[in-house]
């Protein structure tokens, strides 16, 4: 059975897509830690990030770098933090989270709620900054 991320990539489940190429897909997390919190996933369904071959892992990092730059251009933040946990969905993924301080990356922090309109506006602004 396909993961939820594979189903998002296939368009079976709606998402707030911000970037895509032939190997990777980036979209807003629907349970965000901050405005602009995005996920970057390979289109190839591989569970564990360190099971990606070297070329795919390097490409994913470079794709995430472009997405992070676009997030930082749109969302006021000191940095865009990167987190890889990989337990909640069996599909390799990177979290990109706009932060002001280290504590903003804590999983113990409450998640924020955004309207569909806010998600769509943020996705559009970030997407327009992807090179």
Image (cartoon, helix red, strand yellow):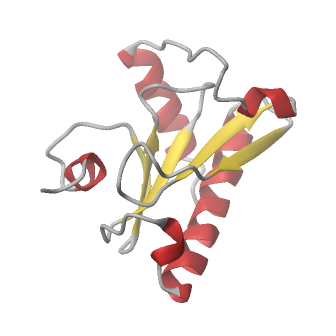
Residue at image coords 48%, 56%: 93
- Picture coordinates of residue 125, whole percent (x, y): 55, 36
Residue in the picture at 46% in, 35% down: 29
Nearer to us in this view, 114 or 90: 90
Q: Residue at x 17, y 56 (%)?
A: 2
Residue at coordinates 67% horizontally, 62% vertically from top-left?
65
Residue sticking out furthest to the front: 87
Above or below 79: residue 119:
above
Q: Is residue 72 above or below residue 25?
A: above
Q: Percent from the top left, x then y, of residue 74?
A: 68, 36
- Quadrant containing the N terminus in the rendered view: bottom left
The reply, left or right, for residue 92 in relation to residue 131 is: left
**In front: 55, or 92?**
92
Q: Looking at the image, which is closer to me, 116 or 57?
A: 57
Whether residue 110 sits left or right of residue 100 in the image: it is left
Number of labelled discs? 0
Specify the quadrant of the image occupied by residue 14: top left
Quadrant in which the C terminus is drawn? bottom right
Image location of residue 27, percent across then percent down: 43, 44
Residue 108 lies, in percent from the top left, at: 66, 22
């Amino acid at each position: 059975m396909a993961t939820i991320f594979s189903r998002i990539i296939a368009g079976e489940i709606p998402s707030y897509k911000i970037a895509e190429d032939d190997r990777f897909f980036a979209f807003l997390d629907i349970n965000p830690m901050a405005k602009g919190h995005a996920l970057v996933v390979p289109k190839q369904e591989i569970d564990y990030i360190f099971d990606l071959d070297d070329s795919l892992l390097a490409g994913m990092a470079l794709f995430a770098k472009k997405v992070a730059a676009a997030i930082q251009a749109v969302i006021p933040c000191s940095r865009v933090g990167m987190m890889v946990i990989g337990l909640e969905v069996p599909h390799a993924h990177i979290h990109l989270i706009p932060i002001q301080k280290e504590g903003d990356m804590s999983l113990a922090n409450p998640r924020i709620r955004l309207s569909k309109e806010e998600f769509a506006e943020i996705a559009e602004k970030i997407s327009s900054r992807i090179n």
